[in-house]
Image (spheres, coloured by chain):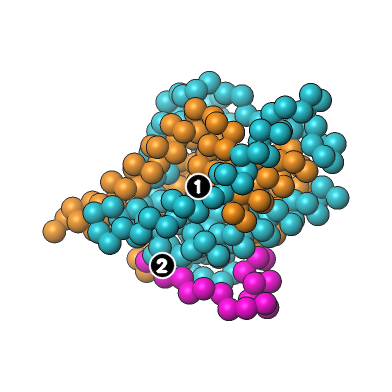
Amino acid sequence: MSLLSALISGLLFGAGLILSGMGNPAKVLAFLDLAGAWDPSLALVMVGAISVAFPAFHWAKRQPKHTSLLGKPITLPQRPVADRKLIVGAVLFGIGWGLAGYCPGPALATLLSAGWPAILFVIALLTGLLIVECYSARHP
Amino acid sequence: MLIGLAAAMLIMFNGRIAGISGILSGWLVQPRSGWRLAFLLGLIISPVLWSWLGTLPATHAIHNPWQILLAGLLVGIGTRLAQGCTSGHGVCGLARLSPRSLLATVLFMAAGFVTVFLLRHGWH
C-alpha cells in the first residue's frame, strides 16, 4: 500500500510539473528573468502547491504518535535554522538553476520526453549528488 | 495544485517529505528503498502516461551541452549541501513554516535571478 501511494504521489507530482510549465526550462528562465519579459506565473504555481500542502503538514505535525495513515513514521527534519552548508548549497543550486532552467523534479519528470538536454542534466545532477556524498563520507 | 496534492499525499500516507533531491540522493545511498523507487518511477513515467491521454506541452531547453553539464553539477552539489531543492525547501519546507527552508528559498531564488540577469543582460 505504501509503495502504491508513493507511486501515485510521484505520478501526480510529475503531472503537476508538466501541467504547470515547470517542466519547460524556457518558462523557468522567463520566470527568473526579472529584467526581461518577466513571466510571474510560476510564482502562482508555487503558492498553489504550498497552500494545498499546508493543511497536510499542519496535520502531520500534530499526530501524537508521529505515524502516517498507513502506520509509517512521520519524518520531519529538525535541524538548526541555518548553517554554512545551507547557505553555500542554496546559492550554488540557484546559480545552476539559472544557468539551464532545470531543477531536479522537472528534469526527472521530462527525462523520457524532452530529449538529450534533460538526460544530460540528470547525469550531471547524479554526479553532483555523488560528489558530495563521497566527500562527506570521507570527511565526516 | 497537483504538486501540493502529491506532497500532501506523501506526508499523510508515507510520512515522508516530497523533496525530489532528497529522495534522489537517498535512493543513491539506499538503492533498495522501496518508497523512493516507487515515487521516482511515478515521476519519470508521468509524461509517458500523459502522452497516452493527450499531447504533452512543448518544452524548450538551452542547447549548450557544457552549460547544461555545469548546471547539473551545481544543482547536484548545491541541493545535497542545502539538503533540499525547489520541492523540499520551496514547497514542503515553506508549507510546514520552516525558517531554514525560507532562507534557502530566498537564497536560491536570488541566485537564480542574478545568474539569469548576468547571462541575458550583463555581458552586452
The answer to whether B110 is drawn above or below residue A21 in the figure is: above
Q: Quadrant of residue B66?
A: bottom left
Percent x, y of residue B120: 24, 58
A40 or B46, nearer to the observer? A40
Chain containing mark 1: A
Residue with the most extreme left position: B124
For this view, does A70 lie left or right of residue B68? right
Q: Amino acid at mark 2?
A: Ala
Q: Secondary structure at mark 1?
A: helix
Q: Quadrant of residue B109?
A: top left
Crowdedness of circle 1 by 10 Å Cα count: few (<14), some, many (20+)? some
Q: Which residue is mark 2?
A: B61
Quarter of the C terminus of chain A within the rendering: top right
Q: Residue at x 59, y 33 (%)?
A: B96
Q: Is residue A98 visible?
A: yes
| Colour representing chain B | orange
A123 or A37, nearer to the observer? A37
Crowdedness of circle 2 by 10 Å Cα count: few (<14), some, many (20+)? many
Q: Which residue is mark 1?
A: A47
A117 or B89, nearer to the observer? B89
Q: Residue at x 62, y 29 (%)?
A: A77
| Colour representing chain A | cyan
Report if the CB atoms under discs 1 and 2 are less than 8 Å apart: no
Percent x, y of residue A70: 84, 41
Q: Secondary structure at mark 2?
A: loop
For this view, does B74 lie left or right of residue B30? left
| Image: magenta residue range | B45-62
Q: Amino acid at mark 1?
A: Val
The answer to whether A12 is drawn above or below residue A58 in the figure is: below
